[in-house]
């Protein structure tokens, strides 16, 4: 009974915690620019995080190895160190963007000054990480994030185009000339990366250790990533579909986070807006908590230092100092440069630099019989693993050139 | 501990032969390629002033459209909390910034 409850809770939190600030931005903008034509990329990204989430969870449950222990082991100190430094930097920027996103959503409800909302957001994140046990951190925020299901329901209301009409327009919106093709590729990279952010892998694998998973939990791991992330994808996809069906007909190409909430306000009015803001706030808060803790996890695991929520702070000082430091640096950065959505875009694009090496290490460790025994990667996991490493390597090489070529998605 | 009697064990230890010593070279090669592509992208987008102006104009049009939708929803009392005031302020700031950028682009495009 307990296992069923854990499973249900895991699926619900994986679903509710699937969306973060990067997805809010890229999916809404992509839908408002290219109708449904980038939905396929979101599906590819979801398959990628399912394949690698399952692999990282299995690796942790069977061997006790987490993502960055695998990085150290499989890539060595040199290249592994490069992977760690790039991970820490992009996750720090991502945490900054998530804190800014929390502040912006808070501002939409209270109209308090941005700086005040940002400080409250940082205090809230610190309080959650410091006070709550790990099981509450991973489940409660994801559970509240489920309010974003309102976007999924909104798909069926207040549409100016039928599904067939949207599909036809999606075909005709495909880019025909060079600059538009680059813009399309830029959003494809953004959507793919925001689905497979490196902190998600680090947090999920560390969570398996925090929850004391063993090989008995392998089926739970498979079901959580398979069902939870798949349903999470539907919520994320709803953002794109609603942008195509509700925002384009009104001439809106979303530049602000409030435009995402409009997708639910237009069909359902006040309560639709309230649910959307509530869900968005907790989804982004969950991501802020995960990014801050992931920095602590990654560094401690790489250098083999004590880590974890179950340990008192005095026993894991580096871990606790790192997550706290991440929040403080993120707060200072967002107060200095008060453009969280631009920071989020940069975080997503630059994250791609940390992706291939971290994913490669997990893949290699999970394919090693000495580590995994009978639970090593099977044929399907190896084929999909290699395909996604190839996709991520191409994406990593193209991401920054595309950012420059499209003026961060502004050249039309 | 891993089950050494499994079929996988008989097939060998590390199922993915991985030449780690080449990883540093491969990583450096991709970084160099990304830098070269970034330089090409930088010079390539220099000649796209008309597309940048069109992009900036599109943003401004979108912000005006969003403001109009917000006013309609406000009349219906459909906006929660301080959504109308806060989002309208955000739109104003964004419009100001975009107008400035657009002016500079148009000047660069004409001059």
Image: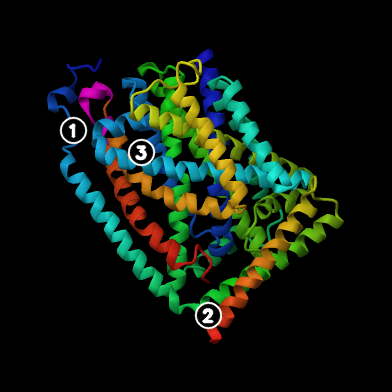
Disc 2 from disc 1: Cα separation? 54 Å
Up-down relation of residue A224 to residue A178 (above or below): above
Task: Give the number of the mark in front: 1 or 3.
Answer: 3
* Residue A374: in magenta span: yes
Task: Give the number of the mark in front: 2 or 1.
Answer: 2
Same chain, labels 2 and 3: no
Of residues B60 and A144, which is closer to you in this image?
Answer: B60
The quarter of the rendered structure image containing the N terminus of chain B is: top left
Residue extending farthest to the top is A1
User: Residue A391 at what x, y percent from top left?
Assistant: 33, 51
The secondary structure type at the circle numbered 2 is: helix
Disc 2 from disc 3: Cα separation? 41 Å
Same chain, labels 2 and 1: yes
Number of labels in the image equals 3
Find disc 3 in the rendering and name its residue.
A84
Disc 1 from disc 3: Cα separation? 25 Å
Find disc 1 in the rendering and name its residue.
B15
The secondary structure type at the circle numbered 3 is: helix
Same chain, labels 1 and 3: no
Classify 10 Å Cα crowding around label 3: few (below 14), some (14-19), many (20 and above): many
Find disc 2 in the rendering and name its residue.
B50
Measuring 81% from the left and 60% from the top, which residue is drawn there?
B71
Residue interval drawn in magenta:
A364-375
User: Residue A349 at what x, y percent from top left?
Assistant: 45, 53
Q: Is the magenta region chiefly helix, strand or loop?
A: helix
Tell me if I can see residue A56 in this picture: yes
N-term-proximal mark, 2 vs 1: 1
């Amino acid at each position: 009974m307990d296992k069923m409850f854990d499973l249900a809770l895991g699926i619900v939190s994986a679903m509710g915690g699937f969306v973060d600030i990067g997805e809010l931005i890229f999916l809404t903008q992509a839908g408002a620019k290219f109708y449904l034509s980038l939905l396929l990329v979101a599906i590819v990204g979801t398959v990628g995080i399912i394949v690698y989430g399952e692999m990282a969870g299995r690796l942790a449950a069977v061997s006790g190895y987490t993502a960055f222990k695998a990085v150290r082991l499989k890539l060595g100190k040199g290249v592994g160190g490069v992977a760690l430094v790039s991970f820490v930097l992009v996750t720090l920027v991502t945490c900054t963007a998530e804190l800014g996103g929390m502040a912006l959503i808070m501002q939409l409800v209270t109209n308090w000054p941005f700086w005040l909302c940002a400080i409250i957001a940082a205090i809230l994140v610190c309080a959650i990480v410091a006070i709550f046990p790990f099981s509450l951190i991973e489940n409660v925020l994801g559970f509240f994030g489920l309010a974003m299901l309102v976007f999924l329901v909104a798909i069926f209301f207040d549409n100016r185009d039928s599904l067939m009409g949207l599909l036809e327009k999606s075909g005709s919106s495909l880019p025909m000339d060079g600059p538009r093709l680059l813009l399309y590729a830029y959003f494809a990279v953004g959507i793919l990366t925001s689905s497979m952010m490196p902190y998600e892998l680090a947090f999920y694998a560390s969570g398996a250790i925090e929850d004391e998973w063993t090989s008995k939990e392998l089926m739970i791991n498979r079901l959580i990533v398979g069902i939870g992330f798949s349903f999470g994808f539907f919520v994320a996809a709803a953002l794109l579909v609603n942008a195509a069906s509700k925002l384009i007909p009104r001439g809106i190409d979303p530049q602000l986070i409030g435009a995402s909430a409009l997708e639910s306000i237009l069909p359902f009015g006040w309560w639709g807006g309230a649910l959307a803001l509530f869900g968005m706030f907790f989804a982004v808060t969950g991501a802020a908590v995960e990014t801050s803790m992931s920095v602590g996890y990654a560094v401690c695991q790489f250098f083999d230092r004590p880590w974890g929520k179950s340990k008192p702070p005095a026993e894991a000082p580096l871990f606790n100092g790192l997550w706290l430091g991440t929040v403080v640096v993120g707060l200072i950065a967002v107060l200095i440069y008060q453009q969280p959505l631009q920071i989020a875009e940069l975080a997503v694009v630059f994250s791609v630099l940390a992706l291939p090496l971290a994913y490669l290490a997990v893949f290699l460790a999970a394919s090693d019989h000495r580590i995994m025994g009978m639970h090593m990667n099977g044929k399907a996991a190896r084929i999909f693993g290699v395909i996604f490493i190839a996709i991520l390597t191409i994406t990593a090489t193209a991401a920054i050139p595309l950012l420059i070529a499209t003026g961060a998605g502004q050249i039309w | 501990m891993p089950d050494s009697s499994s079929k996988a064990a008989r097939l060998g230890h590390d199922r993915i032969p991985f030449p780690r010593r080449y990883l540093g070279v491969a990583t450096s090669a991709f970084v160099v390629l990304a830098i070269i592509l970034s330089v090409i992208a930088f010079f390539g987008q220099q000649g796209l002033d008309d597309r940048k102006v069109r992009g900036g104009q599109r943003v401004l049009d979108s912000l005006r459209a969003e403001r109009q939708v917000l006013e309609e929803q406000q009349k219906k009392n459909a906006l929660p909390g301080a959504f109308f005031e806060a989002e309208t302020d955000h739109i104003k700031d964004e419009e100001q910034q975009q107008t400035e950028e657009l002016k500079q682009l148009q000047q660069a495009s004409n001059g």
